Image (spheres, helix red, strand yellow):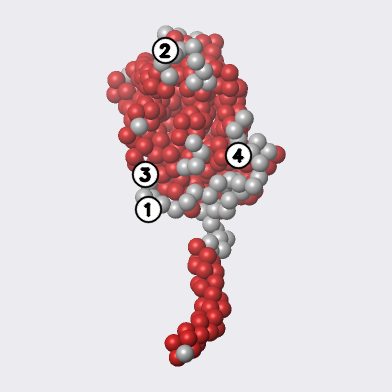
Amino acid sequence: MSHTKNDSHSTMGENISTPASTALLDDKISLKSTNEQPTPKWWASKSLEHKPLDSAYAWTVVASGCFMLMFSMGCVNSYGSYQTYYHLHQFPHEPTSTLSWIGTLQFAVMNLFGIPSGILCERFDSRLVTFVGGLIMGIALVIASFCDTAVWKLMITQGFMFAVGASLVFIPAVSMPAQWFTKHRALAVGIVVAGSGIGGLWLTPATDHMITELGTAWALRITGIIVFAVNSIASLFMRNRLVVKSREKIVDFSIFRDIRFLFIFGGGICGTAAYFTPLFSLPSFAIQVSGKSDDFGTNLITIINAASTVGRIATGQVAASLGNINTLSMCTCLASLSVLVLWLPFQSGGTLVACAIVYGLFCGGFIGLVPVVMAELWGIQRIATIIGLLYIANFAGTMIGAPSSSALLDNVGGGTNYKPSIIFSGVFMMIAFIFFALLRVSVNRSFIVKV
């Protein structure tokens, strides 16, 4: 009897304690669930996966990126106006190789900061990242306007500081559209990167006019204010669609074990080394060698930027039919031939214009298609950091390219013979084509397949 009584008491105790234990367990589960899914901070990246791909909002991201590149890369592409004025008027005793370092730093540092910019895009709201980038760019140009009496001061402000801000704008602008599109991805990215050509198209003559009428100081101030204002508005629409989960490695370098990435990396180094020589040297070549006016030299930069704008959009459409890697290889090869065939042997104004058109069309494809190829080969989840890693190659190419080209002009060409610099640019672009051709073969060895 006592045994039955004790069992009954034990059972009753268990029945009494079960609701309390269950409630306590539910509280723990609820607390754990709350800890696992904290409320996102205001500055953190938020998922918009519920928004459809290829939607109307996706095109606002494209428009935003286009305006951002218009005033970041557009300023870089229009630096030729400053360099021509610095070389001929403001700093006539400075070597061309020294003056070219300002433009070199703009592009090189922007690429060097590609990795931290990509990481910031993954961990913070891209709207905040791009706003801060625009603020830094604007401040850099305004400060540079008070430092235009010494080249080294301009290197720090117009070169290095501006590039840091441009990096925070450039990486989100070229990587975010890939998250919002599938069907029109190449076209979307092409429109975004066309912004740099559009910027150079009107910024170059506008900058040249401001320099002539107001001087370089006011040209820098006005540009800085406009850059900040436009970028502040555009940054409101630059939103991540996907949120990348946190990981132990901040930067994953394992992608360097992929031969396909190494081919793109090598092509990036060589293509970037060649890229800026026509932009920086074609205007002064027209003035010094061909005997053309300053306006004609400036117009060549405008033509390159106009052709580049068309090329970046058109190659996106061509890539839809021929394949992204096929089109990238074709563009790099034709950009090289435009320099070696149209610029190297000739000095007439007509051939210089033809070179500017052809080079602009196909170098635009080289710039616009690389992010699309990256998204095609490795997906869009970590596209910002992968592109950031690739831009290490662009940094290396920039450090090799513009200074070497200017040094060849000063030391081998005596400041007036541009042929060594032209050969340098054309050959390096052709080597970039070889790397991209090897990438094409590594992906698919059948030459009749769309890749």
Mark 4 to mark 1 CA distance (whole Å): 27 Å
Residue 342 in picture, x, y percent from top left? 47, 11
* Residue drawn at point x = 63 percent, y = 41 percent: 61
Residue 151 in picture, x, y percent from top left? 39, 41
Q: Which numbered disc covers residue 180?
A: 4
* Residue 91 lies in quadrant: top left
The first of marks 4 and 1 along the sequence is 4
Mark 4 to mark 3 CA distance (whole Å): 24 Å
What amino acid is labelled 4 in the image?
Trp
Note whether 424 is above or below 114 in the view shown: above
Tag 1 secondary structure:
loop
Name the mark nearer the viewer: 2 or 4: 4
Tag 4 secondary structure:
helix
- The residue tagged 2 is 340
The answer to whether residue 218 shows anywhere in this view is no
What amino acid is labelled 1 in the image?
Glu
Name the mark nearer the viewer: 2 or 3: 3
What amino acid is labelled 2 in the image?
Leu
Q: Nearer the viewer, residue 235 or 148?
A: 235
Note whether 366 is above or below 139 in the view shown: above
The first of marks 2 and 4 along the sequence is 4
- The residue tagged 3 is 252
Task: Report the side of 306 relative to 384 (left or right).
Answer: right
Mark 3 to mark 1 CA distance (whole Å): 9 Å
- The residue tagged 1 is 248
